[in-house]
């Protein structure tokens, strides 16, 4: 079977090659992968920049959806089940998903919502789980609260927007791109702004009709973390999860103090597999009830995986997904 293998650090040493087909051990399922979504962490791992990431050679990718073709789970996850993989732990990167067949512990897969296709299913787990953790970083968000999202056009940002809309909250979406802002408005974001708009804080407060939002999901970091704190209202909180805008940010301390605000570092891999799957089911139910689904930017065949990684660096609107052939 074919797999995208990083033989040495760097995308130039990452190739599609034949590798031995794995087989399922006790409590494992063997999945014929039909689609695998890319995340920035996959590229960091290939480039040797993921703290504690895998050492070459490894198969990259964490998100996937496919069909169980062999199962040693006493009927818990029978062959023929359509599953998506909930393996947010970086330890599992060595068991990557950019391949035609992979073995997964049965407790790291969940059934795909009936009306989702392979691409949507593969795109969902990591981005939605990260967004969920950030949004609910200090307890569950309620429908009368207001959620702001930075990098709202990215994979995690769009997931946060979708989840907040599914919960019925007002959403303030911040995106650098005019085209993305228009698409965010079509998705239902209540207010959209460019993060560098002059006098942005006043404009946001005018738009929402109060002095501050309750939660900011900050997927960008750097100067946008500073902005996030300025946008908070009393008892506001920020889920801090990304560094594409910079690894350091200035915190306006008086703003933090007098709003009794809090910053929460988010790590998607902080749950064990069983808890992650339970959380995923909660997310999937919320999305299905609200008739919301992952936003896909572009799909690529397995042979064009390096074009998919290039697209990932090109500020896509939603998820970039690699498709596997239906017949092996
Ligand atoms: N902590 C965790 O557990 C965890 C989990 C998943 C992801 N992450 C991290 O979160 C970040 C976002 O992930 P993702 O999957 O959403 O990535 P993505 O799909 O590539 O989206 C990132 C978005 O951030 C914005 N952006 C990119 N570069 C920027 C810059 N220099 N300044 C301002 N905005 C910028 C863009 O949004 P606009 O074009 O709309 O402005 C872009 O679409 C990545 O750093 C990723 O590694 C962390």
Image (tube, rainbow, N blue to C red):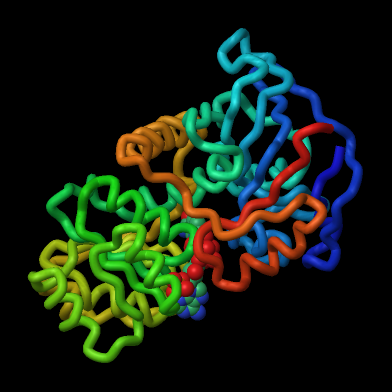
Image quarter of residue 71: top right
Task: Provide residue 245's location: percent of width, then percent of height.
Answer: 47, 78
- Residue depicted at x 55% and y 26%: 107
Tell me how many marks there are.
Answer: 0
Task: Provide residue 94's location: percent of width, then percent of height.
Answer: 72, 45
Image quarter of residue 148: bottom left
Q: Is residue 200 above or below residue 155?
A: below
- Residue depicted at x 37% and y 69%: 150
Task: Provide residue 192's location: percent of width, then percent of height.
Answer: 30, 72
Q: Is residue 112 above or below residue 132?
A: above
Task: Provide residue 320's location: percent of width, then percent of height.
Answer: 61, 57
| Quarter of the figure with the C terminus | top right
Judged from this view, the residue extending furthest toward the top is: 74
Q: Is residue 193 above or below residue 183?
A: below
- Residue depicted at x 44% and y 74%: 179
Q: Is residue 216 above or below residue 326?
A: below
Q: Is residue 52 visible?
A: no
**Left or right position of 8 against 28:** right
- Residue depicted at x 71% and y 41%: 95
Q: Is residue 214 visible?
A: yes
**Left or right position of 69 against 76:** right
Nearer to me, 72 or 247: 72
Image quarter of residue 19: top right
| Quarter of the figure with the N terminus | top right
């Amino acid at each position: 079977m074919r797999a995208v293998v990083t033989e040495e650090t760097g995308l130039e040493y990452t190739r599609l090659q034949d590798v031995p087909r794995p087989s399922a051990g006790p409590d494992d399922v063997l999945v014929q992968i039909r689609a695998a979504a890319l995340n920035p962490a996959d590229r960091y791992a290939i480039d040797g920049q993921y703290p504690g990431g895998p050492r070459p050679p490894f198969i990259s990718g964490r998100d996937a959806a496919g069909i169980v073709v062999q199962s040693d789970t006493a009927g818990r996850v029978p062959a023929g089940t359509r599953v998506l993989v909930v393996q947010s732990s970086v330890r599992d990167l060595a068991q990557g998903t950019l391949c035609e067949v992979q073995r997964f512990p049965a407790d790291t897969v969940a059934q795909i919502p009936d009306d989702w296709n392979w691409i949507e299913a593969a795109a969902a787990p990591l981005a939605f789980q990260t967004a969920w953790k950030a949004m609910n970083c200090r307890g569950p968000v309620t429908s009368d609260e207001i959620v702001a999202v930075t990098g709202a056009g990215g994979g995690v940002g769009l997931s946060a927007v979708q989840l907040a809309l599914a919960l019925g909250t007002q959403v303030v979406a911040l995106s650098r791109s005019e085209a993305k802002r228009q698409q965010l408005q079509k998705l239902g974001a209540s207010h959209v702004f460019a993060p560098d708009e002059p006098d942005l804080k006043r404009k946001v407060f005018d738009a929402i009709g109060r002095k501050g939002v309750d939660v900011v999901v900050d997927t960008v970091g750097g100067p946008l973390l500073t902005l996030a704190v300025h946008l908070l209202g009393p008892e506001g909180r920020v889920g801090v999860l990304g560094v594409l805008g910079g690894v350091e940010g200035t915190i306006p301390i008086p703003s933090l103090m007098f709003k009794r605000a809090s910053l929460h570092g988010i790590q998607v891999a902080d749950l064990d597999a069983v808890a992650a799957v339970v959380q995923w089911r909660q997310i999937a139910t919320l999305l299905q009830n609200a008739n919301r689904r992952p936003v896909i930017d572009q799909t690529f065949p397995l042979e064009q995986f390096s074009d998919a990684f290039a697209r990932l660096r090109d500020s896509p609107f939603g998820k970039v997904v690699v498709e596997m052939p239906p017949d092996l």
